[in-house]
Image (cartoon, helix red, strand yellow):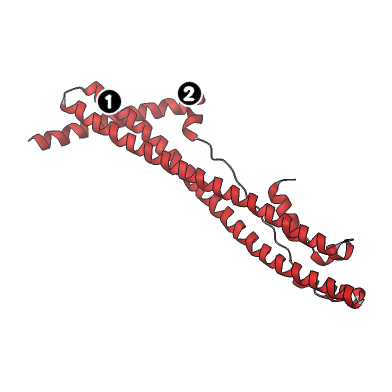
Amino acid sequence: MSLLDRVSTLLRANLNDLVEKAEDPERMLKQVVLDMENQLMQVKTQVAIAIADQHLLDKKKVEHEQQAAEWRRKAELAVQKGQDDLARAALERALSQDQLAIGFTTQAEDQKHEADSLRQALHKLEQKLTETRAHCEMLIAEHRRAKVVGRAAKAQHVVGNDQENTIGRMKSKVHVTAAENAAAVEVLNPESLEDKFRALESEDKVELLLSEMKTRLALKQG
């Protein structure tokens, strides 16, 4: 059973039914709270991992954006030195870094959505645990009073009438998926007809960027 399935099972548990069936109600109720606390710690760990992954993707995105800017700077230098071939190569590297940055941007956005969903689920679980602790304390007190005064049957009836106000039903479904690195997959796939046309378009774009760069530098020198 997965972590979230176990959490969902705990949240759906009817404390009144558990008390009625348990040989030792107090021990059983304390175990329910302990189980929920353990699951809560595991969900917190998942939230921390999701947030860390999001920060890592954001960092990768920024790194590729910076590398793209650096290759454009080198392309300008090459143009100033009359090295058009070097300028073209640098611009190709810049475009490649742009694509990687776009890929990491998409992954970072997806990961942020997943981290937000996990945080919301964690918040609901914390609230439900607080309610469960309070209700368990109430049920334990009821059970102890019933043993003292010898009215266990009446106490069970009171707990049964309070069934609708126990835990209720809540489903927590958190879908955590690792975003694929689109750029890495593209490198592994064989070159398609579309890839060849994109390469031609990229060459045209490089030539256009090179021409614009020359014009801009010429205007500055003029």
Q: Position of residue 67 (x, y in %)?
A: 33, 34
Give SS at disc 1: helix
Q: Residue at x 47, y 26 (%)?
A: 187
Res. 166 in view: no
203 vs 174, left or right, is left
In the rendered image of this protein, does residue 103 appear above or below residue 166? above
Residue 88, which numbered label? 1
Which sits in the foreground, 90 or 151?
Answer: 151
Quadrant in which the N terminus is drawn: top right
Quadrant in which the C terminus is drawn: top left
25 vs 182, left or right, is right
Which residue position holds label 2? 191
CA neighbours of label 2 inside 10 A, class few (<14), some (14 to 19), many (20+): few
Q: Determine contact: label 2, label 1, CB under 8 Å.
A: no
122 vs 163, left or right, is left
Which sits in the foreground, 121 or 109?
Answer: 121
Q: Residue at x 32, y 35 (%)?
A: 68
CA neighbours of label 1 inside 10 A, class few (<14), some (14 to 19), many (20+): many
Where, by quadrant of the figure, is residue 78 drawn? top left
